[in-house]
């Protein structure tokens, strides 16, 4: 086995890991701030990809404007989602929030199947066949862009969470709801922003991956399954834990996929999650929990 | 008190009459559509009953039910086809496997939290679907295993029952459903059921009374997995084929809608809504996609407006009567 094959696998894994991270960080952020597990999260990733497909194919809008439009659109959808559905749940029933978002996921997914059919569609853009070649390693430009976008989104999220007032408020709420309320943080505006950011990241992930993989209404499904495993591995509500676990999973999956059958790749996320639950239930990077 | 006993007697009479009517259906009509609806009702009654036991009584939202169902189905189909086991043994093995997996999932995730349980069960259901599709050497992949054998039960004494007519499956699955419902009813009305409800309402308080929450929760999860797997193990021979679509999310969503609308934690409510929701959408001839969109909307509206479902509404009225004061606040969580 030559080293360039290994580097190739590593790079591909890194790209997919970064995309996992975008989805899982949003999921983890929403859980941390609102204590809601957003079961519809994968559908927003799917909608982001479908929106990108339509913008590029039907309206022939370029790559970067498409990404920007979809991300802004997803942020707006997050705002609306919070105001219309999630705000009324405040502090009430964890199961209710799951069932509510599950209902939303059913509507979005089956509605998309109805309108869009399940036939996977390839999105062609002028960049589809351009590659960057470094020695023996060949990398599609679109994958590199996706990687770059993912890293840019990390940095932006890090900056928001650790360098701005509202980011501090968000972390405060996720650490201790009552105490945050006591020092005058408005949980409503913080939650609204958290949901908007989470959905925005998901939409961005969809738009960035749309030109690389086929677009179809069930794509959110398989992704969100991994995102759930990732947030358990990283520690529920721990955003940076989710990012690290996501990248590790992407790279591992890619490496394993290079040598072993597909079943092993599919099972990896689940097996890792079960293992973590048994030996370190608070997640790799979680604070201690009572077991 | 007298009033209560009367209604209990009446209820028992109603159950007997209802059962007699259900078992008499094949002697009135041989219409395959009616029998298919009956089979579907029997199956969904057990699936939603199992979910109700876990979610309604133990308060654990499980998405793994469809996984148990398919696991039972696949195990039974493979054992009968590849190893030549008799059908009953295959189905029983499938049910035991489902129960074992349920125990494992429950144990690993419930130590952490209810949140983790919901997430892990969902991942498990999705994993089942993916594995059934990708582990081609075992499961034959997306093509599935078609043309399953006609089940035959050999009883001691040379008697045997070969299930080659729709009527036979109707009797078999209805009989199984009745047994499962009886078990569920016995559990939820027993001390175990009350302990489960106590844990759901206030875990620390229940714990302080000497109830071990984890043990009761695991019991509920395992029993429900066993029954769901058993039903899957027999239902698959009615389908005559098993493929990855047995893990379809459609089953999960239908079960959830039945439990939510019937009222989580209400035995009769869920049974009633299983019947209605089996017959009604089929008669209205919705396409599956649109039905799921509609179910999604129902779920959203139910969660926003009446989280207790129909059964929850009756329960609230009952509590109201007990208290003899107008019920003002929200229902207990």
Image (cartoon, helix red, strand yellow):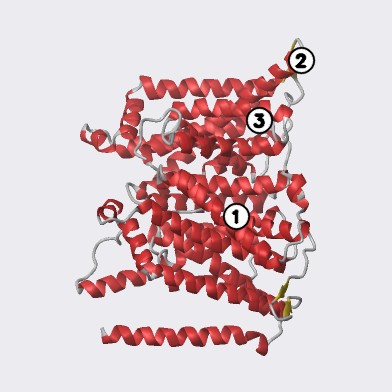
Q: Secondary structure at mark 1?
A: helix
Q: Position of residue B84 (x, y in %)?
A: 77, 61
Q: Secondary structure at mark 2?
A: loop
Q: What separation in Å lies between label 2 and label 3 (alpha carbons)? A: 40 Å
Q: Is residue A132 visible?
A: no
Judged from this view, the residue extending furthest toward the right is B147
Q: Is the residue B98 above or below the residue B7 in the image?
A: above
Q: In the image, what residue occupies the spot 59% across and 39% down?
A: A223
Q: What separation in Å lies between label 2 and label 1 (alpha carbons)? A: 43 Å
Is A193 left, or right, of B129 in this rendering? left
Is B123 left, or right, of B330 in this rendering? right
Of the two numbered discs 2 and 3 on the same chain, state the one appearing first in sequence: 2
Label 3, on which residue? Answer: A61
Where, by quadrant of the figure, is residue A61 drawn?
top right
Label 2, on which residue? Answer: A2
Q: Secondary structure at mark 3?
A: loop
């Amino acid at each position: 086995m030559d080293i360039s094959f290994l580097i190739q696998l590593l790079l591909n894994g890194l790209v997919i890991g970064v995309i996992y991270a975008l989805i899982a960080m949003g999921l983890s952020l929403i859980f941390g701030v609102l204590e809601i597990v957003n079961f519809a999260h994968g559908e927003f990733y799917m909608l982001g990809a479908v929106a990108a497909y339509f913008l590029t194919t039907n309206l022939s809008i370029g790559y970067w404007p498409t990404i920007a439009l979809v991300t802004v659109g997803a942020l707006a959808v997050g705002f609306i989602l919070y105001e219309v559905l999630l705000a009324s749940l405040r502090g009430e029933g964890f199961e209710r929030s799951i069932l509510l978002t599950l209902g939303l996921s059913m509507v979005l997914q089956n509605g998309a199947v109805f309108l869009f059919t399940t036939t996977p569609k390839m999105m062609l853009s002028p960049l589809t066949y351009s590659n960057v070649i470094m020695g023996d390693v060949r990398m599609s430009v679109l994958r590199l862009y996706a990687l770059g976008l993912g890293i840019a989104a990390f940095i932006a999220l890090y900056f928001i969470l650790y360098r701005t007032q509202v980011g501090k408020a968000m972390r405060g709420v996720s650490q201790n709801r009552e105490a945050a309320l006591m020092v005058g943080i408005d949980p409503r505006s913080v939650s609204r922003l958290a949901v908007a950011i989470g959905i925005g990241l998901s939409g961005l992930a969809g738009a960035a991956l749309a030109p690389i993989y086929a677009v179809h209404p069930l794509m959110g499904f398989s992704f969100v399954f991994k995102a759930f495993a990732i947030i358990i591995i990283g520690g529920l509500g721990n955003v940076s834990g989710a990012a690290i676990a996501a990248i590790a999973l992407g790279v591992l999956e890619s490496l394993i996929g290079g040598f072993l059958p597909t079943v092993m790749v599919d099972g990896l996320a689940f097996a890792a999650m079960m293992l973590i639950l048994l030996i370190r239930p608070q997640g790799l990077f979680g604070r201690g929990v009572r077991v | 008190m007298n009033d209560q006993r009367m209604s209990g007697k009446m209820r028992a009479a109603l159950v007997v009459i209802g059962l007699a009517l259900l078992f008499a259906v094949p002697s009135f009509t041989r219409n395959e559509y009616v029998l298919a609806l009956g089979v579907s009702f029997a199956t969904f009654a057990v699936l939603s009953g199992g979910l109700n036991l876990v979610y309604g009584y133990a308060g654990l939202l499980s998405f793994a039910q469809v996984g148990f169902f398919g696991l039972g189905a696949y195990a039974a189909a493979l054992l009968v086809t590849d190893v030549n086991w008799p059908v009953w043994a295959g189905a029983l093995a499938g049910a035991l496997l489902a129960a074992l997996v349920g125990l494992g999932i429950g144990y690993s995730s419930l130590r952490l939290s209810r949140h983790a349980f919901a997430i892990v069960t969902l991942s498990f259901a999705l994993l089942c679907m993916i594995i059934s599709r990708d582990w081609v050497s075992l499961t034959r992949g997306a093509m599935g295993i078609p043309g399953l054998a006609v089940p035959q039960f050999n009883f001691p004494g040379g008697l045997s029952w070969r299930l080659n007519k729709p009527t036979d499956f109707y009797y078999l699955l209805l009989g199984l459903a009745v047994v499962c419902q009886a078990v569920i009813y016995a559990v939820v009305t027993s001390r175990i059921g009350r302990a489960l409800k106590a844990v759901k309402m206030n875990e620390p308080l229940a714990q302080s009374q000497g109830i071990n929450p984890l043990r009761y929760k695991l019991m509920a999860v395992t029993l429900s997995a066993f029954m769901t797997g058993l039903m899957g193990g027999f239902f698959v021979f009615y389908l005559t084929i098993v493929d990855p679509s047995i893990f379809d999310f459609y089953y999960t969503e239908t079960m959830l809608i039945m439990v939510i609308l019937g009222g989580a934690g209400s035995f009769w409510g869920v049974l009633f809504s299983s019947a209605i929701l089996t017959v009604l959408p089929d008669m209205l001839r919705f396409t599956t996609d649109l039905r799921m969109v509609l179910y999604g909307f129902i779920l959203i509206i139910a969660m926003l407006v009446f989280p207790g479902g129909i059964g929850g509404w009756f329960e609230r009225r009952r509590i109201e009567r007990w208290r003899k004061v107008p019920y003002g606040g929200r229902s207990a969580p």
